[in-house]
Image (cartoon, rainbow, N blue to C red):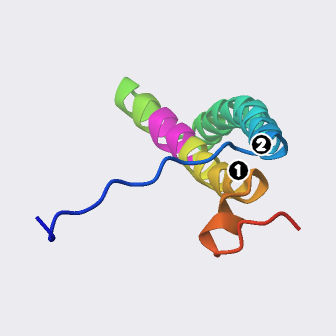
Amino acid sequence: MADMPSHDPVPGRRDPRRLERETRAWLRYRRMMKWMAAASVAAALLALLYLKLSGVEMGINVIIATSAGVGLSVLLGTALMGLVFLSNSGGHDDEAAGGGQEK
């Protein structure tokens, strides 16, 4: 019975300022991702335009592959960078560093 792990303690109340900071960070992330989705569509269209102007024969396979490859690559890259900024502005980096206090 002595080797049994104990339960985790019940977390205390969260600071309302911290909750507001996290909420603002998520709202900014969502707004940024709407713009980045538009940018990924624009990048895919520009890639298709470039292929059209360069004289490449564009079958349906080339159009689908280029659109998916360019569009999803841009969207994935911006989403991951956005999560880095979200982590920083939401205060999660401070917690991971052991500080847990706002500067």
Q: Which residues are magenta?
A: 66-73
Residue 64 seen in the figure: yes
**Tag 1, which secondary structure?**
helix
Q: Is disc 2 surrounded by few (<14), some (14 to 19) or many (20+) residues within 10 Å? A: many
**Is residue 95 on the magenta stretch?**
no
| Residue nearest the viewer, comparing 103 with 84 | 103
- Residue at label 2? 25
Which image quadrant is residue 37 in?
top right
Of callouts 1 and 2, the N-terminal one: 2
Please tell me the numbered disc located at residue 39: none
Horizontal side of 3 relative to 9 (left or right) equals left
> Which amino acid, mark 1?
Leu
Horizontal side of 45 relative to 55 (left or right) equals right
Residue 58 seen in the figure: no
Location of residue 33 with respect to 102 vertically, above or below: above
**Is residue 67 on the magenta stretch?**
yes
Query: How many angstroms separate mark 1 from mark 2 (CA)?
Result: 6 Å
Is there CB contact under 8 Å for labels 1 and 2? yes
Please tell me the numbered disc located at residue 86: 1
User: Furthest-left residue in view?
Assistant: 1
What residue is drawn where x is 65% and y is 65%?
A: 95
Q: Position of residue 43 (x, y in %)?
A: 67, 39
What residue is drawn where x is 70% and y is 44%?
A: 14
Quarter of the picture holding the N terminus: bottom left
Horizontal side of 31 relative to 83 (left or right) equals right
Q: Position of residue 69 (x, y in %)?
A: 46, 42
Location of residue 39 with respect to 80 vertically, above or below: above
Q: Is disc 1 surrounded by few (<14), some (14 to 19) or many (20+) residues within 10 Å? A: many
Location of residue 98 with respect to 57 vertically, above or below: below
What residue is drawn where x is 75% and y is 40%?
A: 19
> Which amino acid, mark 2?
Ala
**Tag 2, which secondary structure?**
helix
